[in-house]
Amino acid sequence: MTTIRMLLTLALHRNCSTLQLDVSNAFLHGDLTENIYMRQPPGFIDKHRPTHVCKLQKLLYGLKQAPRQWFQKLTDFLLQFGFRFSRSDPSILIFNKHQIQLYFLIYVDDILLTGNNSPMIQELHQLHSHFALKQLGPVSLFLVIQTIKTKTGFFLHQTHYAQQLLHTTGLAECSSAPTPITPTKANQLESNTPFSDPQLYRKLAGSLQYLSITRPDIAFIANRICQHMHAPTEHHFQMLKRLLPYIKGSLHYGLPITLGNLQLRCYTDAD
């Protein structure tokens, strides 16, 4: 997620368009390099040889090799084109020759492409002849993160994702709260009663953690909630439920990316 924000920041400061691409049936494009056999699927069983197995010629979804082989095939093509892996993040490949800079970010079958040379980007359409590639236009919805182009830059938000979370918990019509957490006293007793549905707690905690990508205002309490995934209590679930009314009242909060000083600054509380 940090790489995505960095990529959008670079595109904004260099006035480059950011395109979003999608690959249909991505895992089926990889090359099978091992001998793998499977039982005959229901409805396609040979009546004369019902006990025979099928030798796979192509990858299928569900195979452990499928994601790795798909990534390998796509990146092999890009390396031949002239891209190189970033040393900081292997999910992004960089083309940097003759003042031309292109960035190709891969997340499974979702792709972001930006750069300072439109003709070279058009050349990358060779990908269409190798993969079932769909160009979705300028980036707008990437990994459930909505991206809006504004006069000052980009605005990233997860309003739709937050609404779905509220519907899942049955709190879509709840009253909003002005803060994400209430102060607790040091001597306040906490309930040690185990929560009846730990799986639900873990699901909601993970969703809140993902929501904090564009909502740093809930990052602290989301982190506290996630610290109790192994054995949540009724008190922890009440703490989780207390956060949701705040989200209800701040659905349209998000993360702006604007023009500014690109000098990297680091802060520490250590001497």
Image: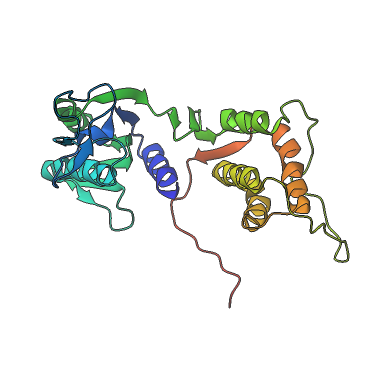
126 to the left or right of 161: left
Q: Quadrant of residue 32?
A: top left
Regarding residue 76, the answer to whether it shows in the image is yes
In percent of width and height, residue 218 lies at 66, 47
114 or 222: nearer the viewer: 222
Name the side, left or right, on which 264 lies relative to 177. left
Residue 211: give x, y in percent of width and height: 58, 41
With respect to residue 148, does 67 lie above or below?
A: below
Q: Position of residue 149 (x, y in %)?
A: 47, 28
Q: Nearer the viewer, residue 257 or 194?
A: 194
Q: Considering only vertical position in the picture, is 89 above or below 250?
A: below
The quarter in which the C terminus is drawn is bottom right
Taking 150 as reference, is 180 left or right? right
Residue at 57 percent of width and 32 percent of height: 161
**In the current view of this chain or complex, which residue is farthest to the front?**
48
Q: Is residue 176 above or below residue 63?
A: above
